[in-house]
Amino acid sequence: MKRFIFTSFCLIFSFLAFSQIGGDNTYEFLNLTPSARLAALGGEFVAVKDHDISLVLMNPSTISKEMDKSIGLNVVDFYSDIAYGHVSFSKSYDRIGNFALTLQYVNYGSFDYADYAGIQQGEFSASEMALVLGWGRQLTPRISIGANAKFIYSSLDTYKSYGLAIDLASTYYNKESKFTAAIVIKNIGSQLKAYRTGNSEPLPFEIQAGLSKKLEHIPFLFSLAFTHLEKWDLTYENPLHVQEVIGEETSQTDSNSFGRKVFSHVILGGELSITENFVLRIGYNYRRRQEMKVEAKASTVGFSWGFGFKISKFQFNFSRSTYHLIGSPNYISITTNLDKLLR
């Protein structure tokens, strides 16, 4: 355990120079929350190792032989005409490890084509996808490692782009204490072909870590995730909080407070097992709430919830995650095992 923690911190601080977040990168669809379970627990990352194939896209070190021939389908009814999701299939081999093949996609819908004068001249579409090959292997009874190789394609009207990226991950799992710790380094790579010649853009590089603990006497799993560990200050100064005072601008924001900088990295989640086949979930994303809330009515922005249930040989998960007062996307996930299904 000491070696795992030491190695994790070395990896984190070795990448501190790469401090870029949303708005500075291309292929941001790679960071969309892929499954209902993840969305319910906060939407970014969760350190759980219970052979759930819907988690392998975010943490390939959870790919295990117990997932052999598992299949998962995840769809999200996002805002406007945007829809995205992914489908995964896992296969294990004794000597070389465990694999998961995932097709991740996002469809942005149709847009009106207009010239400079505003005269419409038809429609155009936009979509992106990634073919992800994941690999995971158990190093010791408690430590596993994994990697994702991503082949990325983006089509925005007549503009096309291709890219390659990899994720590196490691997970520590203590079965006796039901404690899990994990670290993932995401989207190390670059564009192979930019949308425009000579205009290459960086990928959304990120370092994430997480802890989870299942309580001993209560059927409750507590999850704690840490995002964007490659960049300390994720806060920004909201222009709505700036007011004129005798001709001078005075900031009214608390964006420089130490507490806000800390909690901008933190996501809380919980999972309560009502029965063996029914689970309730809830999550809280502090940074999402601070960035997306409306001051006059913050409502439940930043909170998420969901549930999961098992019917026969299928596992169903549903969740809603509140990004803004305008509405909450619906996440639906279905998983099963082909061996058990056909048996």
Image (spheres, grey):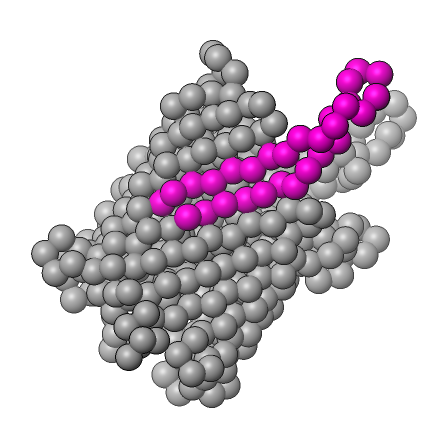
Pick the front one: 148 or 205: 148
Please report the residue visible at 52 percent of the width from the left and 41 percent of the height from the top. 29
Which residue occupies the extreme left position in the image?
95
Which residue occupies the extreme right position in the image?
246
The picture places residue 52, in percent across and down from the top left corner, at 37, 66
Up-down relation of residue 68 to residue 153 (above or below): below
Pick the front one: 182 or 137: 137
Q: Quadrant of the C terminus?
A: bottom left
How many numbered marks are there? 0
Please report the residue visible at 78 percent of the width from the left and 18 percent of the height from the top. 115
Which residue occupies the extreme top position in the image?
198
Please report the residue visible at 51 percent of the width from the left and 70 percent of the height from the top. 317
Please report the residue visible at 45 percent of the width from the left and 33 percent of the height from the top. 153
Q: Which residues are magenta?
A: 103-132
What secondary structure do most residues of the magenta stretch adopt? strand
* Whether residue 110 is visible: yes
In the image, residue 173 lies in the stretch drawn in magenta: no
The picture places residue 152, in percent across and down from the top left corner, at 42, 35
Up-down relation of residue 71 to residue 194 (above or below): below
Q: Is residue 340 left or right of residue 83?
A: left
In the image, residue 110 lies in the stretch drawn in magenta: yes
* Whether residue 282 is visible: no
Pick the front one: 126 or 270: 126
Q: Quadrant of the N terminus?
A: bottom left
Indicate the quadrant where residue 67 lies.
Answer: bottom left
The picture places residue 134, in percent across and down from the top left corner, at 30, 49
The picture places residue 226, in percent across and down from the top left corner, at 45, 52
Pick the front one: 284 or 314: 314
